[in-house]
Image (spheres, rainbow, N blue to C red):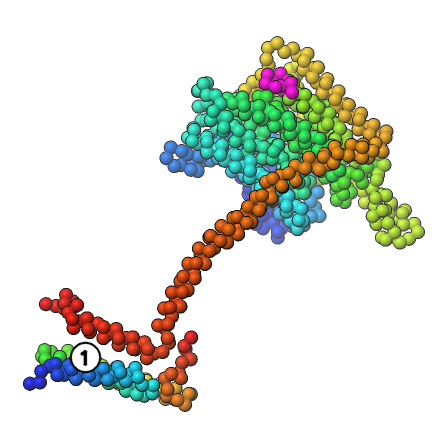
Amino acid sequence: MVPIYYYLILSAILFSIGVGAFLIKRNIITIFMSIELMLNAVNLSFVAFAHHWHQVSGQIFVFFVMVVAAAEAAVGLAIIIAIFRTRATLNVDSVDLMKL
Amino acid sequence: MTGSLNLWLIPLVPFAGFLVNGLVGRKLPKVLVSAIALICTLIPFLQVAKIWFQLSSITTPYIEHLGTWIWTGAFHADFDLQLDQLTMVMLLIVTGVGFLIHIYSVGYMAHEEGYWRFFAYLNLFMFFMLTLVLSENFLLMFVGWEGVGLASYLLIGFYLLKDSAARAGIKAFVVNRIGDFGFLVALFLLIAHFGTLSFNEIFTRIAQHPAWQGGILTAIALFLVLGATGKSAQIPLYVWLPDAMEGPTPVSALIHAATMVTAGVYMVARTHPIFERSPLALSVVAFIGAITCFFAATMGLVQTDIKRVLAYSTVSQLGYMFLGCGVAAYSAGIFHLVTHAFFKALLFLAAGSVIHALGGEQDMRVMGGLRKKIPITFWTMTMAVFAICGFPPFAGFFSKDEILYQAFIWPHGGKILWFIGWVTAGLTSFYMFRLWYLTFLGESRAQTHELEKQGAVVHARSDSKLVIEAEHTHAVHESPWIMLGPLVILGTLSVIGGFIGVPEAMWGHDELGHFLEPVLGSVPHPPGVSSGLEWVLSGAAVAIGLLGLLVVHFMYKVKPELPAKLATQLHGLYALLLNKYWIDQLYGAVIVTPLLLFSRYILKALIDRGIIDGAGFAAGATAQGFGAIAQRIQSGNIRSYAGWLAVGAAVLLIAVYFGFTAHFLPQ
């Protein structure tokens, strides 16, 4: 039996990688991927806790997160393609029309 | 007496006229505007006349309670109207003369811009003036008092595109404010001392305490006098009235001669129980009256504008009324108020008719010889001139004589007061007959004047002089009957108006005095004064009046070059009078300029700009400074936001790790 904190540490590591990448990277697709990574880190801890407490609600939550993430990926990729078509770049720092 | 007199209708009908004409008059035809204004003045007049005939069956004072206005603790002020003999006299004057002047205005203002506006303002004035005389307490009276000031301001500045008219309106309003301040302080003192503003309650209380003398009552009376000097154009606040002549002539007749300016006299008569307890205040009233009467008359001697002569004459005659009230002969003051309303309204209206005939000319130096051209105006004006100069049996004779007689027998400096009043009677006669001679008698000086001004430029023909003369003669025309009618009625009243108060010494019954007795008390007749004295004083007054006439006849008829010669020889005196003792300049230098400088540099530059605006700007700048600092966090860079988010989450995690959140967790 693997103790739960193993999972939690792994989840924290994955989440931190996601945060770090989100902060550092400028490529919009990489940022998108790091968001997915953070979501999945959270999913991992949900599943771990569900197993640990013998409750099914954590797993149901994970399904919800996956559905939302899939929908978000669809919308996000559409936006990315639209941006690439108009700007011919994927650098987020150059997409700053709304900035004062 | 059964049923209500419906006094409330008297002021509110003109107010309705004001509302209709003021709101939609612009779109109505002139006929309708004048019809509304006339009907809304006629209805109160008819009602007042009806009440007059019922008067014997009414128990006075008749009080009509319309509702409570202010009710706070022990103090309350109501919408109460009161009818007594004094109110009755004032109502008849205001509605009667007011209605006549409304009729006259229809003719006089026929070609003016803003016709509807004029009549709306006139009706507004009627509303406030009737409120003033009908009110049963000081507060409602104050409403009317302020309201007539407003109407006066609006009407003086009626020609609002004319700079001098706008300035005159503001001057009248501001000078009246000073007087109103006095009135207001008197009201506060009354509330503090009596806890009520009702006339009847205050006067009953005073009557119950015969020991009350001077003290607070003197203070109240003196502040009331300050109010009265403002409204009734007495020294030191008379300066606005001559300038008020910038308004249309019917306005000068109605507001600045017959009714509004007499509000101060009415107020002193109305509040006479307060004045009776304060010999000092009475003396102040008497001396203000006498001095104003004399100085205004001297200023009137040399004026050349026909309306300005009449303005100074009004100030002077109001001085007589004050003199009458100041020697505790209130009914004499009111008597002169009544006759003055007749003849002075007539003088102004006739002057308006002259101005109308000459197409707007007001300078008497270019008038003359109008007797034949506008005979009805001439004859009615003649009646008014004789009335104001106090020749028997015209109206002014009886009222002025009564005042002079009462002044003479007044124990506190009465002889001096009488002497000033007597000399002024001569001056009055001089300036009125001067006006009469310059305007109506002699040869017309207008033609040469016109020629000098326009000359051959207008008619560049060899016979230009003939052409202009012909045209000019044609231009001088008698006014239409809608203007002459009121003149004739007022002329008749100026002749016979005095018979309402023929003194007993002259086989009369002093009807007005006895009529007013329930309100004003009986006219004092000290023992040991024979009726012969009254005859002697009358004779003296008529004599000095005749002297004035003779001097004018000599100066303007026999030796027409004399006035100019006198003006050069007595240059200092002439300049002093012509410039009205430089009082306007004095007030300007001593009061207005320092006040303006104080406002501009202390109040505006230092306090307003410096302190008040400065505080606002400082607060704004502080907020901006903090904003500039806080703005740096709002970089607009999404990754920096996410970074702050991560830092915040990390801080929370560390806090949890070190046990700061022990009490958050379920145990």
Q: Is residue B324 left or right of residue B214?
A: right
Q: Label 1 is found on which chain of the structure?
A: A
Q: Which of B30 and B166 is in front in this view?
A: B166
Q: Which of B648 and B329 is in front in this view?
A: B648
Element at badge 1? helix
Q: Which of A62 and B379 is in front in this view?
A: A62
Q: Where is residue B618 in the image (x, y as percent from the top left)?
A: 43, 58
Q: In this view, does B173 lie to the left or right of B192?
A: right
Q: Where is residue B642 in the image (x, y as percent from the top left)?
A: 30, 77
Q: Where is residue B554 in the image (x, y as percent from the top left)?
A: 83, 27
Q: In which quarter of the image is the C terminus of chain B?
A: bottom left
Q: What stretch is highlighted in magenta?
A: B407-416
Judging by the rendered image, the residue that carries numbered circle 1 is A61
Amino acid at pointer 1: Phe
Magenta span includes B256: no
- For image coordinates 9% across by 82% down, the residue present is A3
